[in-house]
């Protein structure tokens, strides 16, 4: 059982990085993540501004904070699921030809309890399948 995992994987998006970036913003993920509905406790006209706080509850209640953004290139979030896990998620985009992006997704998560460590171990083992589900959802969103 491991209390911390750093997991990195890649997927592709049939858009240049400048356009693909919006898919990985708090509001942009609504286009392709089923049940993703960010709630902003304070006005957030630019949901990518560092310091922006939002909450989601599509899988489990989680509070997110935008840490860093480089439009068209990278966005990084802190995330805390109370009593379960905390860490960061970083999405980095690079051009792959004229109209494609390679998207690198890194989760660096720490379990907050022994039971959560077991769940985190399972998440780590299933991380490639997790990213395949992202790839599938993004592909279907692009078709729709």
Image (cartoon, grey):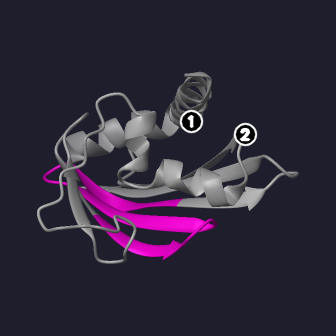
| Front position in the image: 28 or 118 | 28
Residue 116, quarter of picture: top left
Residue situated furthest right in the rendering: 97
Report, in whole angstroms, how far the alpha carbon at label 2 lies from the one at label 1.
Answer: 16 Å
Residue 110, quarter of picture: bottom left
Q: Which residues are magenta?
A: 65-90
Q: Residues within 10 Å of mark 1 (few under 14, many from 20)?
A: some
Quarter of the rendering occupied by the N terminus: top left
Whether residue 6 is visible to the viewer of this picture, yes or no, is no
Residue 47 place in picture, x, y as percent? 34, 64
- 129 in the magenta segment: no
- Residue at image location 26% in from the left, 53% down from the top: 85
Quarter of the rendering occupied by the C terminus: top right
- Residue at image location 66% in from the left, 51% down from the top: 103
| Front position in the image: 4 or 88 | 88
Q: What mark, if any, has residue 14 been given in the picture?
A: 2
Q: What mark, if any, has residue 131 been given in the picture?
A: 1
- Residue at image location 57% in from the left, 67% down from the top: 74
User: In the rendered view, does 98 fall on the left or right side of 79?
Assistant: right
Main secondary-structure element of the magenta-colored stretch: strand
Residue 135 place in picture, x, y as percent? 61, 32
User: In the rendered view, does 130 fall on the left or right side of 60?
Assistant: right
């Amino acid at each position: 059982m491991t209390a911390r995992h750093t997991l990195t994987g890649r997927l592709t998006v049939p858009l240049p990085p400048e356009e693909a970036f919006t898919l990985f913003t708090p509001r942009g993920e609504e286009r392709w993540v089923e049940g993703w509905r960010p709630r902003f406790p304070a006005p957030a006209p630019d949901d990518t501004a560092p310091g922006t706080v939002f909450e989601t509850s599509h899988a489990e209640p989680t509070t997110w904070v935008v840490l860093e953004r480089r439009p068209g290139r990278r966005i990084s979030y802190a995330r805390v699921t109370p009593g379960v896990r905390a860490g960061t998620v970083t999405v980095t985009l690079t051009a792959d030809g004229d109209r494609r992006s390679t998207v690198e997704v890194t989760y660096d998560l720490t379990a907050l309890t022994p039971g959560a460590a077991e769940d985190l171990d399972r998440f780590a083992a299933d991380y490639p399948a997790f990213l395949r589900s992202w790839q599938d959802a993004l592909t279907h969103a692009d078709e729709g």
